[in-house]
Amino acid sequence: MDDTRMNADPRAALLETLADSGVRLTRPRRAVVEALATSHGPMTVAEIHARLQDRNVDLGSVYRTVALLCRLDVMRSTDTSSTTQRFELTERFTGHHHHLVCRRCGDIQDIDGCVLQDQALARLARRIRQVARFRVTEHDIRLYGICARCSPA
């Protein structure tokens, strides 16, 4: 897999995808897309809303837009052990990447590209196919630990 983000600024591709899907590009939807396109990792709905405070977008519009973008497979939930659900754009807009998850604060950071070497990934897929009769088509890796903000100095 490519070790860099597919598109450093996915706004145009996002807006084109939404327009092609017949979605009306309202002001609140454009604002949410802007927040997602400029984020550097998964965000909660509250974090998305906070980034839009100066744009007068109500929380309900953010929730509805997030639900719509998930239904359109434009964004996805990044499940963690935390009770707070975070969302990010799908890999077709961001490129393949993995996550670092802080066990204390729940923050999620992106690691651009794949942390697995092609040979290791191929061996893993072969082993899973042999043992579980399961064909791996994609993967997502989360590494858990303590982030710099939560670590003692």
Image (tube, helix red, strand yellow):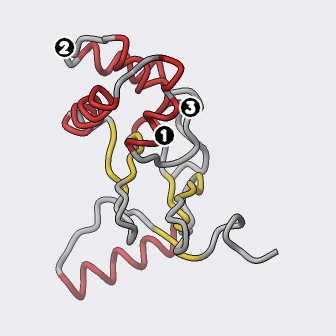
The residue drawn where x is 37% and y is 11% is 27
Q: Quadrant of the C terminus?
A: bottom right
Residue 22 is marked as 2
- How dense is the environment of label 1, judged by Cα within 10 Å: few (below 14), some, or many (20 and up)? some
Q: Nearer the viewer, mark 1 or mark 3?
A: 3
Residue wearing tag 3: 38
153 relative position to 55: left or right = right
- How dense is the environment of label 3, judged by Cα within 10 Å: few (below 14), some, or many (20 and up)? few
Please, is residue 33 above or below residue 86 in the view? above
Q: Quadrant of residue 25?
A: top left
Q: Which amino acid type corresponds to the residue marked 2 in the rendered image?
A: Gly
Residue wearing tag 1: 94
Q: Foreground residue, 78 or 9?
A: 78
Residue 148 placed where, x, y %?
71, 66
- How dense is the environment of label 2, judged by Cα within 10 Å: few (below 14), some, or many (20 and up)? few
Q: Which amino acid type corresponds to the residue marked 3 in the rendered image?
A: Thr
Residue 16 placed where, x, y %?
35, 15
Helix or strand or loop: what does disc 3 sit on? loop
28 relative position to 68: left or right = right
The residue drawn where x is 17% and y is 79% is 133
Whichever of callouts 1 and 3 sits on the residue coming sooner in the sequence is 3
Whichever of callouts 2 and 3 sits on the residue coming sooner in the sequence is 2
Q: Foreground residue, 119 or 3?
A: 3
Helix or strand or loop: what does disc 2 sit on? loop
Helix or strand or loop: what does disc 1 sit on? helix
Whichever of callouts 1 and 2 sits on the residue coming sooner in the sequence is 2
Residue extending furthest toward the bottom: 131
126 relative position to 152: left or right = left
Q: Which amino acid type corresponds to the residue marked 1 in the rendered image?
A: Thr
